Amino acid sequence: MFNEGDIAPDFELTDDSGNQVKLSKMLETGPVLLYFYPADFTPVCTKQACMFRDIYANMRAAGVHVLGVSPQDPASHARFRKEHALPFPLLADPDKSVIRIYGANGPLGIGVRRVSYLIAPDRTIQQVVLADFRVSKHEELAQSATRRS
């Protein structure tokens, strides 16, 4: 897992619409709140996604983009995004390559941890939250992001 001040590795993944999303390209227009979550349609993941949805307008007003990453395929992400009216892309990482790089893989490589990173346009990690069951910690990071910009 990375710490504040580390440089976020660049990556490219497929989103819920089948588009390729590259972190460095997103950062060209502002900071990114990159969050990793275990699975679409699970109770805590749904709560987290809907929390980001509910404060998304404030985040965008502050110039912050939101990207969610989990191992499900783009079709699952598209259903999840549509069902919960999520205004931000969900990225598919079925082989967990980015999940591993960012230290969001679970113990012994099983599962995915709930990790959020606030990444500055120069790829410096500004804040990190690891909280598997406490969505409020991730919300605090998101609220902080709206005040930083």
Image (cartoon, rainbow, N blue to C red):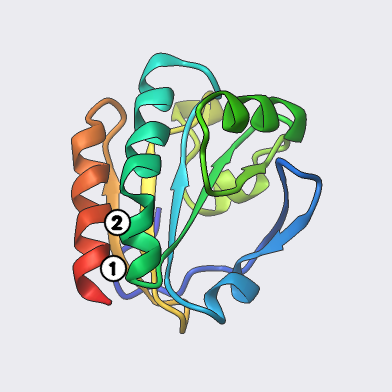
Write down the residue under mark 2. Answer: 128
Q: Quadrant of the C terminus?
A: bottom left
Residue 7, position in %: x, y?
45, 75
Question: As drawn, is 107 to the left or to the right of 110?
Answer: left
For disc 1, the marked residue is 4
Circle 2 Cα neighbour tier, 10 Å, few/some/many (<14 / 14–19 / ≥20): many
Q: Are marks 1 and 2 in contact (CB under 8 Å)?
A: yes
Q: Residue at x 29, y 56 (%)?
A: 128
Which amino acid type is marked by label 1? Glu
Left or right, 142 with respect to 95, comes to left
Q: Can you name the residue that lies furthest to the right here? A: 18
Depth order, front residue of 88/44: 88
Relative to 141, is 60 above or below? below
- How crowded pointer 1 is (Cα within 10 Å; few <14, some 14-19, many 20+) is rated as some
Q: Residue at x 32, y 37 (%)?
A: 51
Separation of residues labelled 1 and 2 (CA atoms): 7 Å
Nearer the observer, 130 or 27: 27
| Residue at 50% over, 37% down | 105
